Amino acid sequence: MKNSPKKPIRVLVVDNHEIFRIGLREGLSSTSEVTVVGEASNGNEALSKARHLLPDIILMNIGMPVMNGIQTSLEIKKSNLTSKIIILTHKTEGDTVFSAIKSGAMGYLLKDISLTELTQNICKVQRGEPAFTPSIALEALSLIASPGEHKHTEPHPLTPREVEILQLVAEGKGNKSIADELTVSEATVSTHMNNILTKLHLSNRVQATLYALRKGLSSLS
């Protein structure tokens, strides 16, 4: 019996510029990995369609009227939707990127990205891995990663093994790479990762990376 074909990743495109939405829809729909299931022009519409369509990924612009991308991301998080959010924008300010990360976004990419790179990053986020344009990710992380007097001032609740896994996550490694390095199963890494997020009251690997940097458990070097 042949394996059933892999289902394409279901994407909701959110941008206040119709021309950009059309181009993105046509570009992504030409790939086998992705299918665009809907579009929205503002945050309110995005939230409504996300609840109705339950997309895997929401590609969202930050600078929208009514409710911007970061506010929308927060509302989606409050709604307990499983959709993963990628911010697709031209804004590169570190504080904006940091705010997007705190809101629950799993990716932050610039609009000049190629279709091939965008598709690869959508697949990456769907696997649960963060996807950030390197230069602006470093700028955002540096806002909270510089040496400071508050590191280690509060004990963390993690076990030594969880700290080890968190450090590898902060290096940008996925579950498979971590499992290979620690000689354990991916399921074991996944269980540890879920425990880490639960104990630290975090939403995703991006926020876990920020925690590791802030606590001095990892560094940008």
Image (cartoon, rainbow, N blue to C red):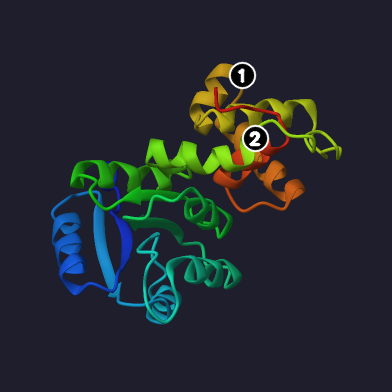
Structural crowding at the residue carrying mark 1, measured as other residues with C-alpha within 10 Å and reported as few (<14), some (14–19) or many (≥20) = few
Q: Is residue 46 above or below residue 114?
A: below
Report the side of 59 relative to 105 (left or right): left
Disc ID at residue 182: 1
Structural crowding at the residue carrying mark 2, measured as other residues with C-alpha within 10 Å and reported as few (<14), some (14–19) or many (≥20) = many
Disc ID at residue 213: 2
Q: Quadrant of residue 44?
A: bottom left
Residue type pointed to by label 2: Leu
Position of residue 103 measured from the top left corner of the image (x, y, whole percent): 56, 60
Along the line of sight, the residue nearer the viewer: 64 or 54: 64
Q: CA distance from mark 1 to mark 2?
A: 21 Å
If the image is split into quadrants, where does the C terminus sit? Answer: top right
Position of residue 201 measured from the top left corner of the image (x, y, whole percent): 72, 53
Report the side of 28 relative to 71 (left or right): left
Question: Which mark sits nearer the N-terminus, 1 or 2?
Answer: 1
Position of residue 24 measured from the top left corner of the image (x, y, whole percent): 19, 60
Q: Is residue 104 above or below residue 199?
A: below
Label 1 sits on a secondary structure element that is helix
